[in-house]
Image (tube, helix red, strand yellow):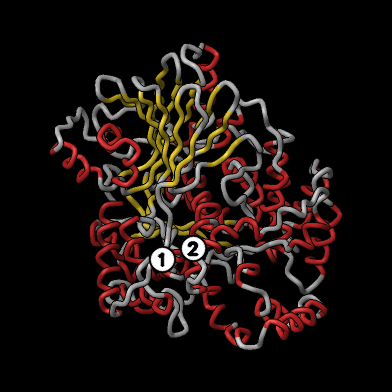
Amino acid sequence: MCGFVGYISNKKHTIEEKQKTKVQKMNKRIVHRGPDEEGYYSDDTIALGFRRLSIIDIEKGHQPLSYEEERYWIIFNGEIYNYIELRDELVGKGYTFQTDSDTEVIIAAYSAYKEKVTSKLRGMFAFVIWDKLEKTFFGARDHFGIKPFYYAVENQGLYVASEKKSILKVIKDRQLDEVALQNYLTFQYIPGLETMHQSIKELAPGHFITKKLNEEVKITKYWQADFLPVAKSEETFAKEIRASLYDSIEKHMRSDVTVGSFLSGGIDSSIIVAIAREFNPKLKTLSVGFEREGYNEINLAEETAEELRVDNFSYTITAQEFMDEFPRFVWHMDDPLADPAAVPQFFLSRLAREHVKVALSGEGADELFGGYGIYNEPHALRMFNHTGKVTNQAINRLAKLMPEGVKGKSFLLRGTIPLENRYVGNAKIFEEAEKKKLLKNYNVRYPYHEVTKPFYEQTLGYHPVDRMQLIDINTWLSGDLLLNADRTTMAHSLELRTPFLDKEVFEVARQIPANLRIAHGTTKYILRKAVEGIVPEDVIYRKKLGFPVPIRHWLKDEMYDWALTIIKESQTEHLLNKSYIVDLLDKHRTGKIDYSRKIWTALTFMVWHRIYVEKSQEFLTEPLTYAVKQ
């Protein structure tokens, strides 16, 4: 697992020492991604930098790596799980290899297949390939967006990096994107290709980027998630799911270092642990919880570990250390991420790194197999399909007049709003009317529906559950879960692997009809059915736990003064109505309505602003030198 940076000039013979120095500065910014080794390559057009965390001991597998008598150069972050099979295919075509690394397999495959190389790869990846002969730059990001890829276009050339902070270190244009801020306040992350800085973009999952000398950057989509339900029996689907998971988990465990697994006690991580221990009975599992009653899943995790006969290591997080570490967490995220469940994963990764270098996790199971309770909503609201448009409009008007917090108001509102307008993903923090009060420069042209509109247009005629899942795959999964997964683990030089997010697993999942994903009053019905006899029955049908974080209680007590200080000292008056947030905090503390997620979203942005805009070093202890203890 690694990190990379690079600069590609617009013209030949323009790379000078100052550009090489910039790339070195960019690379040092991400030392946490690869503390074991660094490497550089430059010629008269390009300068590349690389950081390496050694996972598999491979001779001569150092990067940047060259191929075909140094015609091609590559920097690569990720793991290719079918590289052995792909290598054999290329050998059969006459290609030769100097190493046993998956990195050399990618560059050889590019030599053979050029831009079609992405269709050959099974794994998580972000990489850059430079063709020195043709003066062509090619970069790609994996199908689901497990590994990050940022870029910025300037007059002189193109910057690329695994983390946005590397590019921020060297570019001149650091203008805040207020549309991104507006979307963030709804989604709790920045959806799409934008970042909180106008000049820096994120390459979308399933896309590649190309550039030739004196030509514009070109972005191309090579893959997109889609559902194509087919008629099969439950038994057939269950068998196919089991086979795909066993195959994926076995390949995800390829490593020369100790592999562990996160374990919450829920179904997703339990499936991974149950199968992984069949390949390694000495598998180590890691869990965290909170000291507050009702928010500690450690006991469940320990019970599950005992049933699965694996070792478990756990850690209990206090409110004080949650506050202490929060700025460091925000710095690592690059952009504000207000998902409270992301912060405990920061502690979980720290714990894991004390025991292993590689960990497995269950991201993607909910999005692929229908695991969120909200996916039951189309069935719960089916009565409104028969009441008629005029009646629904009247009900909606009446519901809006009901006082906030009145039982049934939300049900009536959601039932009388079309799916396209009501569902924007797993998180929906501020409504448009609220953002008009909160933002100093609210832009009426960019309501949150604009973010999801293209995906709804692509899925006209689909089952409502399919449409909701595809919204989450295209927004929530990469924008929240995988951003969190990559940054929290890389902050501690830990490699995270996600066996559910495998294109072969998805090929099975995409064929499952919605009525087998959501069925018999439960979510992930067919997935649960598939692992009967593998995972303990009490775990299979355990209610979804999520990752509960007690910020609702903390913001009333332990965190109140801390939160109030952040709001008062934040230099965001030109962007936010700070009195609106203070009012929410006070109402939350004294009232019955839970405003914690709204408050947390504002606080996260304010802390981010202190770090990345105000550059308040005293607010963040050693932000650039923190790395895991070796």
Which residue does the image show at 79% across and 82% down from the upper left? 398
Q: What amino acid type is highlighted by mark number 2?
A: Leu
Q: Secondary structure at mark 2?
A: helix
State whether residue 276 is above or below residue 258: below
**Among numbered discs 2 and 1, the one appearing first in the sequence:** 1
- What is the number of the mark on residue 442? none
* Quadrant of the drawing holding the C terminus: top left
Relative to 236, residue 101 above or below: above
Query: Which quadrant does the N terminus fall into?
Result: top left
* Residue matched to label 1: 227
Q: For the residue marked with disc 1, what is the amino acid? A: Phe
* Horizontal and vertical percent position of residue 20: 50, 17
Q: Give the residue displayed 45% in from the left and 21% down from the top.
A: 47
Residue 231 relative to residue 603: left or right: left
Is 38 drawn above or below residue 91 in the view shown?
A: above
Indicate the position of residue 368 as horizontal and vertical percent values: 42, 65
The answer, for residue 24, to whether it is visible in the render is: no
User: Which quarter of the figure has residue 29?
Assistant: top right
Q: Are marks 2 and 1 in contact (CB under 8 Å)?
A: yes
In this picture, residue 573 sits left or right of residue 215? right
Could one spot residue 15 in this view of the protein?
A: yes
**Which is nearer the eye, 518 or 35?**
518
Q: Which residue is mark 2?
A: 470
Mark 2 crowd level (few <14, some 14–19, many ≥20, 10 Å Cα): many
